Amino acid sequence: MKFLYPFLTLLFFSTYLYAQPTIIDDEISIDNVASVPSGSIRLSFNKVDSTLYLITQDGNIYRVRIDRGIYSLVQNNNDHGLSDVQGFDISGDGRFFVVGNNRNSENATNIAKCNESISK
């Protein structure tokens, strides 16, 4: 019996985490426009090229084509130098900004950085 509780807890949270969103306002609708890569954490719209971009936690930046339901890799973490990404935004003039950590496993510290990344 003692093994049943952790299993049920895990089952509950795994079901809860992957549940569909619940709409609580009648003026809002949700449409599935594209499947995105696993680990996607932030979206940002680039006003310069009228394109939606997303970033994954490991630092890959993708261009999302909502009209086609597809995405394509634009940059990876070698381009901006962060592999533990926490944030992403695009300025009004089209510059990409990536925020994240550089982990130092030797002394268990993190260094937070904000890097400018060039849109390709």
Image: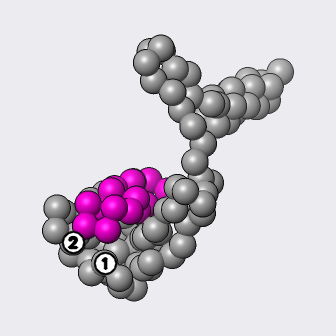
Q: What secondary structure is found at the residue carrying circle 2? A: loop
Question: Is 54 drawn above or below residue 20 in the view shown?
Answer: below
Question: Is 91 drawn above or below residue 20 in the view shown?
Answer: below
Q: Residue 69: x and y, percent?
A: 60, 57
Q: Residue at x 21, y 72 (%)?
A: 95
Answer left or right for 3 relative to 30: right
Whichever of labels 2 and 1 marks the residue nearer the N terminus, that label is 2
Report if residue 51 is visible in the image. yes
Q: Residue 78: x and y, percent?
A: 39, 85
Q: Residue at x 40, y 59 (%)?
A: 52
Amino acid type indicated by mark 1: Ser
Q: Quadrant of residue 17?
A: top right
Question: Is 25 drawn above or below residue 87 in the view shown?
Answer: above
Q: Residue at x 51, y 27 (%)?
A: 29
Q: Quadrant of residue 14?
A: top right
Q: Which of 5 and 54 is in front in this view?
A: 54
Amino acid type indicated by mark 2: Arg
Q: Name the residue under label 1.
A: 119
Q: Name the residue under label 2.
A: 95
Q: Residue 86: x and y, percent?
A: 34, 57
Answer left or right for 24 relative to 119: right
The quadrant of the image that shows the C terminus is: bottom left
The residues tagged by marks 2 and 1 sit, at their Cα atoms, a distance apart of 6 Å
Answer left or right for 58 relative to 81: right
Q: Which of 28 and 60 is in front in this view?
A: 28
Q: Which residue is drawn at 51% across and 75% down?
A: 73
Q: Tell me the magenta residue range.
A: 38-54
Q: Does the magenta stretch include residue 48?
A: yes
Q: Which of 83 and 110 is in front in this view?
A: 83
Magenta portion: prevailing SS class: strand
